[in-house]
Amino acid sequence: MCGIVGITSNKQVTNSIINSLRKLEYRGYDSAGIATLNNGHINEVKSEGRVDVLEKNLSKSNLKGNVGIGHVRWATHGVPSTVNAHPHSSEKVSVVHNGIIENSTILKKYLIKKGHQFKSQTDTEVIVHLITEYLKKDDLKKSILKMLKKLHGSFALGIIFKDEPDLIIGARRGSPLAVGYGPNENYLGSDSYALKSMTNKISYLNDGEFCILKKDSVEFFDQKGNKVNKKILKLSSNEQSYEKGDYKHFMAKEIDEQPTTIKNCVNEYVDKINKEINIFNFPWKANEISSVVLIGCGTAYHSCLIGKYWFEKLTNLDVTVDIASEFRYRRVKFKKDALYIFVSQSGETADTFAALDLCNKNKVKTCSVVNVVESSIARESKFVLPIHCGPEIGVASTKAFLGQMLVLYILSLKIAKMRKEIDKKIYQEKINSLFDLSKLTNNSLETDSKIQSVCSSFVNIKGSMFLGRGLSFPIALEGALKLKELAYVHAEGYPAGEMKHGPLALIEEGMPVVVLAPRDEYYKKTISNMQEVIARGAKVLLITNKSKDEIHSENIWEKIEVENTSEDLLPFLITIPLQKLAYYSAFKKGYDIDKPRNLAKSVTVE
């Protein structure tokens, strides 16, 4: 959520900041702004709405400067407005901020007593006035250290100063922050993606650190002000995957990329010749693990739920699933023989990172399943399993969800083999089936035309239900979430067997209900549950897999069949029609599919 850019250079920076802010639009935002330092004055331009609006306002103001900061804001404190947009500035200081200052109300009262006047409703403005106050008596470095010590909460900061014509301060606690290196200029950004068009040399700030950027130097410091040495990482220069090409939306492109990303992931983890899983650097022995805890938020949480089914089916491990935002607020009984697995697309999810940090402090085994190997969660985990999906720009996750599921499935197979809890023949069969998954996924994309014909019934409805059993239940949750995220339709996912325990009361004439009934061990019971909702007037969209057997049920509204595969892998195929259903429902309503309202790609506040 939100995005920061800072550039100090020997040339004008406004256009470069705008281009970087465009790269950060995927994170979700409602306003944008830029501040530059020019001829000893801080000048800022801010706008409610998209970066396009900001750029138009900039063309009227002729904002110049060789040092500047930019921001796209996702509102927390204060409504979306020009006044509440970042940067926030005094005569001497200008600040952009990602995160939440939890003690802002107390600090604001203290500063008002000191004579400071506030313009906005934001928590961020207290940072501006704190630094301004401290600069009256202290030098820049001491003022920054005092300010950071006063702040409670999470933040990534970019700060420029009237009296420092070649300098930007960056600081991080909780929210991610990266530094980029260039010839005669250096950069600050919320992630490497924002900086990649300018440099492929990156360093990352750890929690509690701050940095001083000048156009020809970068210095890092810990929370006590001691200098810190940083590694400079070199990023891939491939930019092609970041473009939409002929697609109207990134999400449409990312849905269609899933066969390729599945193939890439399988190739990374599975040896086709030896029929073996290539996780040879797993840092723990099989007898050192007796339980697994899967932790995630949103879509990643759903991948954890389905991972639980696989781990329980393939191993004798005790498996639990936790929502990351709840995990660290309970009295968790940490176990040295438990493996704690953290799942996050961005690797920057604040709640998930906080749960990981708590686990690390309790010195337990931590593993992360992420899409960004340079991310905070990846760097702080003892073991990392990348999903190899490439960049995912659409806020509603698609290919990353399938990637998360795939890595969890491969890991469950590997651990089952390590623990000698799976028959060798069955193990080989399951590995062989992975090599067909990409092709089957591609064939299942052909449900497109049928989905387009049914999505009109999901446009103007009061609500909808998604039902499934076993492995299909987490997919039902994910399907409902996608419809909520994109089409703004109230939708709920339920275990099909739970309908008669309350939710059946919500069924009314004409209500669309999506029933996931692949021909697995739960198939017959799911069909019986489907009859319960049909009998009460629901319009049932049945999603199943191809078979010669007829479905013994009357009055089904519509049926969509995906390809056939092993029971373990059917969740990958039945997910695709649900992604397309949400996409086309939102498309018919004219919504901004890649940037749904109130949501962000990288949720960096708790």
Image: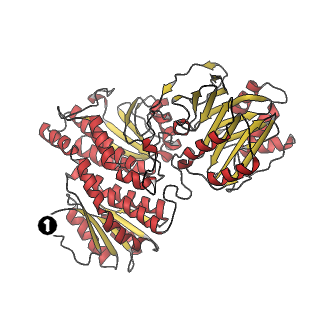
Residue 270 in picture, x, y percent from top left: 24, 35
In the foreground, 55 or 116:
55
The front one of 366 and 450 is 450
In percent of the image, x 34 and y 39: which residue is there?
292
Q: Does 320 appear above or below 474? A: above
Residue drawn at x 51%, y 30% is 200
Q: Residue furthest right?
A: 115
Q: Image check: 232 left or right of 51?
A: left
Q: Is residue 351 left or right of residue 218?
A: left
Residue 273 in sight from this viewpoint = yes
Q: Which residue is mark 1?
A: 549
Is residue 502 among the parts visible in the rendering?
A: no
The count of marks equals 1
Q: Nearer the viewer, residue 70 or 240?
A: 240
Place of residue 124 in the rendered image (x, y in percent of width and height, measured from the top left): 70, 44
Percent across and percent down for residue 497 are: 30, 64
The kind of residue tagged 1 is Asp
Quarter holding residue 493: bottom left
Circle 1 sits in a helix, a strand or a loop, which is it? loop
41 vs 216, left or right, is: right
Position of residue 408 relative to residue 163, above or below, is below
Q: Position of residue 66 (x, y in %)?
A: 71, 33
Protein image colouring: secondary structure
At x 34%, y 76%, the residue is 538
- Please say if 531 is above or below 118: below
Q: Quadrant of residue 251?
A: bottom left
For disc 1, the neighbor class at 10 Å (few under 14, some 14 to 19, many from 20) is few
